[in-house]
Amino acid sequence: DGDGNVLMGMGTLATGAALFEPRIFGYAIDEAILPRDEPRLVRLAVLFLLVECVRMAATIGQGYLFTLLGQRVMQELRLALLAHLQRLPVSLHDRVPAGKLITRVTNDIASLAEMFSAGFVTIVANVLTVGLVIDAALRGNQSSGDVWMALAGPLAKAGADVLRLAAAPIRWRRWRMC
């Protein structure tokens, strides 16, 4: 999908710009501040400002697109859940007030929308950052690349464990509601 490509492109651009900023600082110290080359320092400051503007614009755009995508998904989910409520047996509606069911669906979808728009953006941005840092480590220094590769397995397992632990209460709650 085109939106997904734009979203990943913005995330990669924001992450690349964030990783480029320390390099500008290092170059500025080595090549402009220590030799007292003021014109070069001004050019590097302008470059840093441009890179920071690109990073901020890409981060804001990524957040906007994630929120838009999240709202689309939540709309589809809301429609599907409300259609499901209408197909449930009448006896359920006799036992449980309609307001309680609608409130439950609305609140759960609002919570999912918040998680999707805020939490998911952070997760994707952090995964991209870690991936690009690992790539830089593998390209730049073989020993640090070896350390990253040794840590990749345990970090991936820890992440999967956290996701599994976070999903268990959601599954239980969904089972209890049915």
Image (tube, helix red, strand yellow):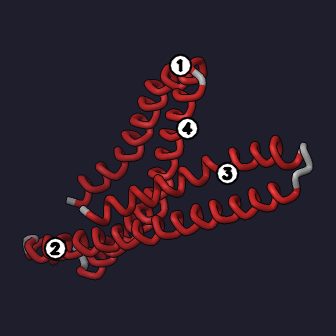
Distance between the Cα atoms at labels 2 and 4?
A: 47 Å
Say which of marks 3 and 4 sits in front: 3
Q: Position of residue 98 (x, y in %)?
A: 23, 80
Residues at marks 1 and 4, CA–CA distance in whole angstroms: 13 Å
- Nearer to us of marks 2 and 3 is 3
Which mark sits nearer the N-terminus, 2 or 3? Answer: 3
Q: Is residue 39 left or right of residue 99?
A: right
Query: How many marks do you count on the picture?
Result: 4
Q: Residue at (43%, 24%) from the top-left corner? A: 153
Up-down relation of residue 32 to residue 74 (above or below): above
Q: Which residue is mark 2?
A: 85
* Left or right position of 155 against 27: left
Dot 1 surroundings within 10 Å: few (below 14), some, or many (20 or more)? some
| Of callouts 1 and 2, the N-terminal one | 2
Judge depth for marks 1 and 3 and give the one in front: 3
Tell me if 134 is positioned left or right of 79 in this view: right
Residue shown at the point (40%, 69%) measured from the top left:
65
User: Pointer 4: what residue?
Assistant: 133
Label 1 – label 2 distance at C-alpha? 53 Å
Calculate the distance from the C-alpha at mark 1 to the C-alpha at mark 3: 25 Å
**N-terminal label among 1 and 3:** 3
**Residue at label 3?**
21
How far is the residue under mark 3 from the one under mark 4?
Answer: 13 Å
Image quarter of residue 71: bottom left
The amino acid marked with disc number 2 is Leu
Whole-angstrom CA distance, mark 2 to mark 3, is 52 Å
